[in-house]
Image (cartoon, rainbow, N blue to C red):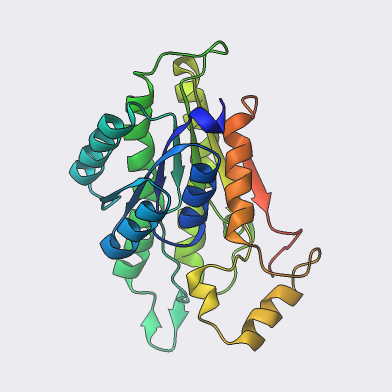
Amino acid sequence: MQLATTAALVTGGASGLGEATARHFAAQGARVTLLDRDAARGADVAAQINGHFIETDVTDEASVGAAIDQARDRMGRITACVNCAGIALGIKTLGRDGPHPLDSFQRSIDINLVGTFNVSRLAAAAMAQNDADSDGARGVIINTASIAAFDGQKGQAAYAASKGGIVGMTLPMARDLAQTGIRVMAIAPGIFMTPMLAGLPEEVQASLAADVPNPPRLGAPEEYARLAAFIVEMGYLNGEVIRLDGALRMR
């Protein structure tokens, strides 16, 4: 697959990793449709990259189904799906206010894991309708895990569980979709300069960056986007999770 001929769906496309991915793909000639709940910001980003925005709740089957139908009608097909929509909550299993609220844990799982699978399965159904290329390829799905899936810190039980689920489903999804010509990959980012981190004091950002062995800085969303683009074009990558973390191992 070539990025210049890709028709991509990007969830969480209004900010952070998703926005960077949408911008990079569009700059390389791809047609891009952004899915997000932030209608104002999503529409603004889409207009800047000559793309398309659809307000979408990734946890809702009807919302995602309608968005994919609209995206396919607009772009002609869907050949890549990059799932970046997600939330990060910091709550200990047992804290000063008592046990971890169950609804917060459930919300993390619903958005990060169930939402990712919901979009992936429906995007796969759309990709299955594509004509295969000379390599038998019809599409690629790239999901966003996290290094927290492997070495989550205090307060990350919900987040690590949701991202661990994404890691765990990567290989079986790739096997499920192999005969259809659809690849499934996951990226596990380390600490990246997303809007959430950008709001922290500079000294906190510096402290986080100092823990990264090499290079000793926070990851740039554009680096995630470039890796996603590489995965799209490297057709032999399948069923794998790639850490993108500067050799960081959290403790």
Compared with 35, 8 (above or below) is above
Query: Which residue reaches farthest right?
Result: 214
Rendered view: 179 above or below 43: above
- Give whichever of 226, 110 is nearer the camera: 226
| Horizontal and vertical percent position of residue 214 | 81, 63
In this rendering, position of residue 172 left or right of residue 41: right
Q: Residue at x 63, y 86 (%)?
A: 202
Q: Quadrant of the image for the N terminus?
A: top right
Residue 103 image position (x, y, % from top left): 29, 68
Q: Is residue 16 visible?
A: yes
- 19 w.r.t. 157: above or below: above
* x then y, percent, for residue 107: 32, 62
Taking 104 as reference, is 147 above or below it? above
Q: In the drawing, does residue 120 fall left or right of residue 155?
A: left
Tell which of 58 and 176 is nearer to you.
58
User: With 22 as the anchor, is 115 left or right in this view?
Assistant: left
Q: Quadrant of the C terminus?
A: bottom right
Quarter assignment of residue 151: bottom right
- How many labels were placed on the picture? 0
- Name, please, the residue furthest toward the top: 134
Which residue is at the front of the view, 201 or 251?
A: 201
Q: Indicate the position of residue 207 as horizontal and vertical percent values.
A: 70, 81
What residue do we see at 30% from left, 31% from top? 72
Query: Residue, x 28% and y 59% (percent of image)?
Result: 37
**Is residue 238 visible in the rendered structure shown here?**
no
Residue 50 vs residue 223: left or right?
left
Please give the name of the residue rendered at 34% of the width and 64% of the height, measured from the top-left corner.
41
